Image (tube, rainbow, N blue to C red):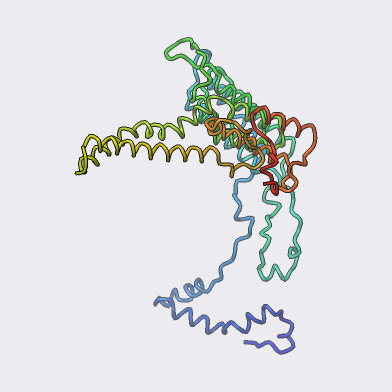
Amino acid sequence: MRVATERSYNTICQRCRVRAVARPPLSRRIWSLAGSIPSISSRDERKTVKSVIKPKIRAPVWHQIRSATFSAKQSKRTLQELQQRKAALLGPPDVMASESEVEKLLKDCAILASQIAQSLPKAPELPSKEQGNPAAALLGIDRGGGQNPAVQPPSDPNQTKELIEGLSNLAYEIVIHPHVFFSELVLRHYVTLQAHLRRPESYPEIFTLYANKPLPRPNTKPVKFRKPNPRQAKFAIPPSVAALALKTTMSVKDLELALAIIETSYALPAFRRSKVIRKALLPGAALTLTPLAAYAVAARVSADSIAGDGYLSTEVAFAGILTYVSFTGMLGFVALTTANDQMERVTWVPGTPLRERWLREDERAAIDKVAGAWGFKNPLRRGEEEGEEWEALRNWIARKGMILDKESLMPGMN
């Protein structure tokens, strides 16, 4: 093997010199690898040793990205198929559409919306200092992990806009159709679809329709409908759906639309009733059974006691247990309803009942998110916002029985 001379050795960079000095000769490495390989036949010996010492080549970054790239023609064809399915599903008059088929159709629309959203062109990143450096390319340095711009070619903005418009209108027409039962799963699919497309303009109308859309009467032909009660808990907008809708609206910077979403979801009586069922039903049932459990425990304690009258012991033990449970539960409720560590900019007006604070906490938290998104991000500059839009938000919050930027709770004022 030819050995590098001193002159040619100095031309090697410092990094390669360290590798060249630290690594043993190739023959020694091959024999050490061969010693660790189990015995094999002479016929496959060369092939096996070659496969063992073959270095692992790192796949380029663009091969790690999903192979299914965005295609405007394919998406347009898929949209046409979805429209045909919608026409076939909602075509027959005076017949309710199959609930499972409607949910499946909206789910497929949401999947197409997700593909369109992921394929939208992003802003190109500025090249780093190491990109274009031959030494970095030879040494395999990959600090930026930049993607190949040829992986997802930029699509035509007009075609993408037409796809978004057509898919959004398709989902809207399905939901508002009178022969479509508006279930919670249909609502979730619709909100997710519009969130992918960044089209939250129809959220307040759809939330209102979810609680007020006429319900079909069973076993009637032609189909007859009845008017629902929008104050029932089953017509409340799920918290996760309302949170996604509000997040999408804040991303497009539409204050009026964000307030309308809060009005049609968190602020409705159905949402508060749903919260009572979800979070207060089980503790309430336990509280109702507390006297029975306390009396049973008191009777057992008096039976084991040898001091005094058994009936008197039962009454004293029952009163003590009931007093302890009631007092502890009262303290826990007061601590839960008066906690303000989660409040950033929006707080309650003094004198607000504790029950109302607990019932409307989700509404206050949503308003707090909106105020934080439209105000200054620096906590030291809170309260300095100006403008007609900000004053309208402050007045709207005041009509809700809340205070925006209470002075005593601001940083440095307590």
Closer to us: 185 or 238: 238
Q: Is residue 11 above or below residue 311?
A: below
Can the viewer see residue 77 in this picture? Answer: no
Query: In the image, what residue occupies the spot 52% across and 28% down?
Result: 272
- Residue 87: x percent and y percent? 57, 22
**Could you tell me which quadrant the N terminus lies in?**
bottom right
Q: Quadrant of residue 268?
A: top right
Can the viewer see residue 235 in this picture? Answer: yes
Q: Is residue 69 above or below residue 283?
A: below
Query: In the image, what residue occupies the spot 46% across and 14% down?
Result: 217
- Left or right of 152 in this view: 213: left
- Residue 47: x percent and y percent? 48, 73
Closer to us: 154 or 1: 154
- Residue 104: x percent and y percent? 51, 31
Q: Quadrant of residue 352?
A: top right
- Left or right of 159 in this view: 320: left
